[in-house]
Image: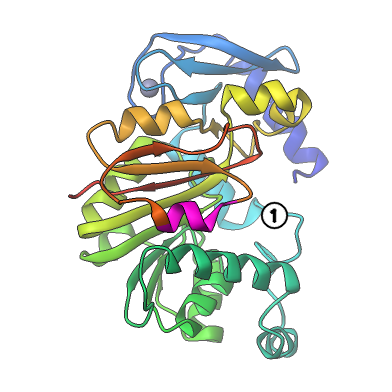
Amino acid sequence: MLTKSQKVSYLIDSVLHYGSPVVCPSCGSTHASEVDRKFVVTRLFECDKCKLYFRHPTDSAEVNKKFYQKEYMEGDGITTYMPSQAELEDLKKMDFTTDSNKNAERLRKLFGCLYSDLKGVKIMDYGASWGYVSYQFRAFGMDVESFEISVPRASFGNQSLGLRIHTSERDLRNGNDIFFSSHVIEHVPSPGRMLDLGKKLLAKDGYLITICPNGSPEYREKDPEGFHSSWGKVHPNYLNAAFFQNKFKSNPYFITTSPFNFDKIAAWDKRSQVVDSQLENEEILVIAKPNV
Ligand SMILES: [Zn+2]
């Protein structure tokens, strides 16, 4: 959700940088093909090498970081809205908002397909905002550490919820069982770099779990308008199954789209490469094991 002035400056930036070189922010390749276009001057490209869909003009890592310190606001009332102390106590009493609670329950089921007991499972919640999901992971008995690029949001979670949300990637611990991110990878300067960090922070046999908007052609076919509206200023990357399959080509993975079929995830042997479902729904889930 952008304010009017953010939209105007986004368009002005896009016009000014329309002629800048088209370079994949993930792998650096300069070979890419146009797949979509908005406002004449912003285009979505597919990298010929790593298959990432990315918006052009791209933002620098500095511009991206500044945007997420304070400017970025999600319209769902919880992701970026920091409640007052009294509101927070109410939220805790009712296990956060119904939507957040439903999402946490969905994640508990998902992790339950991988671990019979979540107690002590070491999870890195990457892109945690002020920690309302990290807090719920802790309530499941998990050993949670988190990362958030926005210093004010991280401080809020650390002070109000007693969490361990770091703002520097250098401070993140190694040896995690799960590197988790939900609706984060579409925002970062380089998806490939983020996944490499996840691999580095995972223990042997650990799981890298990513949930994000689905940019696969099958979804575009089913819902062209949904596809067209899902990329832009706030979502400079649009992830599709082909990108993840290429990134994890030597690793076990399970890829599916919403709604997640937990029976199938539980039945996955954790060694093979599975693309389940027709990839035609709006959210994509990737579970990969980069360190087997
Ligand atoms: Zn690329």
Q: Is residue 206 at all visible to an observer of this figure?
A: yes
Image: magenta residue range: 260-266
Up-down relation of residue 73 to residue 64 (above or below)? below
**Residue 180, horizontal then vertical, whole percent:** 42, 58
Name the secondary structure under disc 1. Answer: loop
Which amino acid type is marked by label 1?
Answer: Met
Q: Residue at x 67, y 24 (%)?
A: 220
Q: Using the image as rendered, state which of residue 264 and residue 54 is in the foreground.
A: 264
Q: Position of residue 54 (x, y in %)?
A: 52, 25
Q: Main secondary structure of the magenta part?
A: helix
The answer to whether 101 is drawn above or below residue 288 in the figure is: below
Decide if residue 219 is on the left or right side of residue 147.
right
Q: Is residue 181 left or right of residue 272?
A: right
Q: Indicate which quadrant contains ligand 1.
A: top left
| Residue 133 vertical position relative to residue 206 in the rendered view, above or below | below
Q: Residue at x 36, y 45 (%)?
A: 194
Q: Residue tagged by mark 1?
A: 73
Q: Is residue 222 left or right of residue 238?
A: right
Mark 1, other Cα within 10 Å: few <14 / some 14–19 / many ≥20: some
- Is 21 or 246 nearer to us in this picture? 246
Q: Is 264 inside the magenta-drawn segment?
A: yes
Nearer to the camera, 183 or 279 = 279
Residue at image point 66% right, 83% down = 95
Q: Would you say residue 187 is visible in this rendering?
A: no
The structure residue drawn at horizontal position 55% and vertical position 45%, both measured from the top left corner, is: 212
Q: Does 78 appear in magenta? A: no
Q: Position of residue 111 (x, y in %)?
A: 44, 66
Ligand 1 closer than 8 Å to label 1 CB: no
